[in-house]
Structure formats: C-alpha cells, structure tokens
C-alpha cells in the first residue's frame, strides 16, 4: 500500500498537486486543499504548489465531505454536464483525429465519402419501410412525419437530411464540432430542413440524462466500428430510445473477406476511402453484435448483407453478411424487461382471488 502511495505522490508532484492532500492510508480528502505533510514524504519541497490551477485546467469537479479511496475517487471524477465518468466514454480520440481532416469533405459526392452518399439509396428505404411497417398511420409525401429520430455520429448530415425530407424530426449528434458546422451549413440551404433537423456537438452518453426514452428511432450508420466501447454505446442507445423503438445499425463484419476487401482493396488499392480509415480489429461480426444487443434490452429483428460495387458506385442487398451488413433491432417493452419472477408475481396479483 505504501508503495502505491509513493507512486501516486511522485505523479502528484509532477502534476503540481499539493502533497498535503494525501494521507498515509492512500486516500484523498476532497474537502480540504491543504493538510499537514506527513514525515518522510518530502512534500515540503514544494510549498508553493496549489491544486487550484490544476483542477481549473482539467475542469474536474470533486464533491465530498469525507475521505475516499483512490479507486473510488477515480469513479467520482467527472466533467461538468457529463452523466458518465470520464473514465468511460464511447469516443475514441484516434478516430476523432481521422475524421477531423475530412470534416469539410462530407458533401463532395465524388470524394472520400462517395460510398456513403450512394449508400443512401438502400439504407434510407430500409429505415423508412421498416418504420412504416411498425406503425399504422403515415402521411403521403411525409411518411415519417411525427417520428423522432436520433442520428448518432451524423457527420456532415448525409443521412439526417434525407430522413428529414421524409418528414421525420431528426436530431443529429457528433463529437466533432467541425462535422456539426459542416452539417449546419448544408442544412441552411433548405428552409424545410432547417425546421426538421437540429444538430448538436455531443456524444450518445451526453444524451442519456436529458433525453431518456425520447426517440422513436436511433440510427447508427457506419459508427460502431469507430467507437471506443460498443457495449456502453448500446446501453446508452437503450436509455434514450422509447420502449418498442427501433435501432438501425450498418457496419462491417469482422471476417477475412472484410479485411481483404474493406482494408486492402478499398483503402490501399482503390482508395475508396483514405488509408487508415478503418481498423479491422474494431470490426464486429453480426453474431457478436447480437450477443451485445439482447442482454441490453434489444431484440434483433433483421440482419441483411450489403455489398458496394466500386465500379458502378452503388450498393446492393446480398444474402451474405460477410462484408457489410445492416441490422434492425427493437427495444423491449417495459413488460418484457421485467424479471421473470417479478412478471409471474404481477400475473398472480391480477388473477381473481
């Protein structure tokens, strides 16, 4: 324990944390800024150091009136306005840096996002028709009118705009501010879309507290292969989706064929997307995705294979899911999420005495 305390003290001195805030037990007092240094810890070498600049710089909030252990302290540290711990996030900084370079290229139909533009030819009808089959009433010309959609990882708005034109009320979120700026600019050219679409620079975990069970549909198209924690991503989707709401995912299978065609051919030979856009280790097989979805409140309804033809610049549905695939899952109703024992008790109560 003392060894751990010394290691922490060494790191604290490098960061400018006052050693008086450390006690012998390896615990941190969040209620005091200075305590008497313990003998032998050499803290008196830095009497001018203060915790305040370090905390202000990192924007860390510590709230307590008692001593806590260091592991517990880590769990409690959070950024303002963020419901999840900073030690848990769906955002992968490496992925953010990749897309930062291309933030102004989203609406170049012949550029690096050409394949995503043409994907709209099959993914938009897939979303539209599936949603319409689940509801009884819809308007001609605006079939998705009244449907609230969350487009997670919306990028420059390539999918949000066609969904908005179908009448849906779309909220597009993306952690990269430059992507949102591009999406806002393009949306501004169409007054109809300006009323139906709103964009926000945030993550799915940011939406959990303020938008619990708000959306009828969540779309995560070409996103899960870029997130840091797929299971946490799915749990957050469950939180903001209404019971019996729909989750649509398009992504890439983790197979030998997807490595050959998706990495070697698409990125390094044909340059359909820039080299390094995808990491094969982050691809996920439909079976694995289904194993993550079902324990987290979703029932998978459909899995369909997709194939991109680079010579014609078009997508088609195919029988195999070995490369790209689209998945539709439905959030279980409140009754279905009840523990079986609790459900049986409720049934017994309803039966006449």
Image (spheres, grey):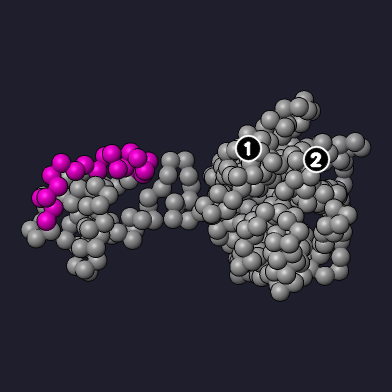
Residue 77's place in the image compared with 265, above or below, is above
Point out residue 309 in the picture as x, y percentages from the top left corner: 85, 59
Name the foreground residue: 119 vs 72: 119
Instruction: Give the class, few, some or many, for how many residues have Cα within 10 Å of label 1's Cα (few <14, many ≥20).
Output: many
**Picture quadrant where residue 346 is located:** bottom right
> Among all residues in the image, which is located at the extreme top?
191
82 vs 194, left or right, is left
Q: Residue at x 55, y 58 (%)?
A: 228
Front label number (2 vs 1): 1
Secondary structure beneath label 2: helix
Residue placed under numbered mark 1 in the picture? 180
Which of pointers 2 and 1 lies earlier in the amino acid sequence? 2
Number of numbered discs on residues: 2
Name the foreground residue: 262 vs 120: 262
Secondary structure beneath label 1: helix
Q: Is residue 132 visible?
A: yes
Q: Residue at x 33, y 38 (%)?
A: 56
In the rendered image, the quadrant that contains the C terminus is bottom right
Name the foreground residue: 314 vs 162: 314
Residue 341's place in the image compared with 185, above or below, is below
Residue placed under numbered mark 2 in the picture? 162
Instruction: Give the class, few, some or many, for how many residues have Cα within 10 Å of label 2's Cα (few <14, many ≥20).
Output: some
145 vs 206, left or right, is right
Residue span colored magenta: 42-61
Q: Residue at x 16, y 61 (%)?
A: 24
């Amino acid at each position: 324990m003392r060894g751990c305390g010394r290691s922490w003290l060494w790191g604290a001195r490098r960061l400018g944390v006052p050693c008086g805030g450390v006690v012998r037990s390896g615990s941190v007092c969040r209620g005091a800024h200075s305590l008497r240094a313990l003998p032998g810890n050499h803290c008196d070498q830095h009497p001018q150091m203060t915790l305040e600049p370090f905390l202000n710089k990192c924007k860390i909030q510590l709230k307590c009136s008692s001593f806590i252990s260091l592991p517990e302290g880590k769990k409690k540290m959070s950024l303002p306005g963020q419901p999840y711990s900073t030690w848990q996030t769906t955002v992968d900084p490496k992925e953010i840096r990749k897309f930062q370079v291309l933030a102004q290229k989203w609406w170049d139909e012949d550029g690096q996002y050409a394949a995503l533009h043409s994907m709209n030819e099959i993914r938009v009808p897939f979303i539209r028709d599936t949603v319409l089959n689940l509801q009884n009433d819809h308007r001609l010309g605006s079939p998705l009118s009244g449907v609230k959609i969350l487009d997670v990882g919306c990028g420059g708005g390539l999918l949000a705009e066609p969904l908005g034109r179908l009448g849906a009320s779309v909220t597009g979120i993306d952690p990269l501010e430059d992507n949102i700026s591009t999406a806002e600019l393009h949306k501004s050219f169409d007054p109809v879309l300006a009323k139906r679409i709103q964009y926000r620079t945030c993550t799915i975990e940011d939406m959990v507290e303020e938008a619990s069970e708000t959306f009828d549909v969540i779309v995560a198209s070409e996103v899960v292969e870029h997130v840091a924690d797929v299971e946490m991503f799915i749990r957050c989707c469950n939180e903001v989706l209404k019971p019996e709401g729909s989750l649509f995912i398009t992504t890439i299978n983790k197979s030998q064929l997807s490595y050959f065609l998706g990495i070697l051919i698409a990125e390094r030979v044909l340059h359909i997307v820039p080299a390094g856009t995808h990491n094969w280790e982050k691809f996920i097989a439909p079976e694995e995705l289904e194993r993550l979805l079902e324990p987290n409140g979703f029932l998978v309804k459909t899995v369909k294979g997709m194939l991109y033809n680079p010579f014609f610049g078009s997508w088609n549905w195919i029988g195999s899911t070995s490369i790209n695939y689209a998945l539709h899952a439905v959030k279980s109703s409140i009754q279905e999420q009840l523990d079986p024992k609790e459900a049986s008790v409720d049934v017994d109560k309803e039966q006449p005495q």
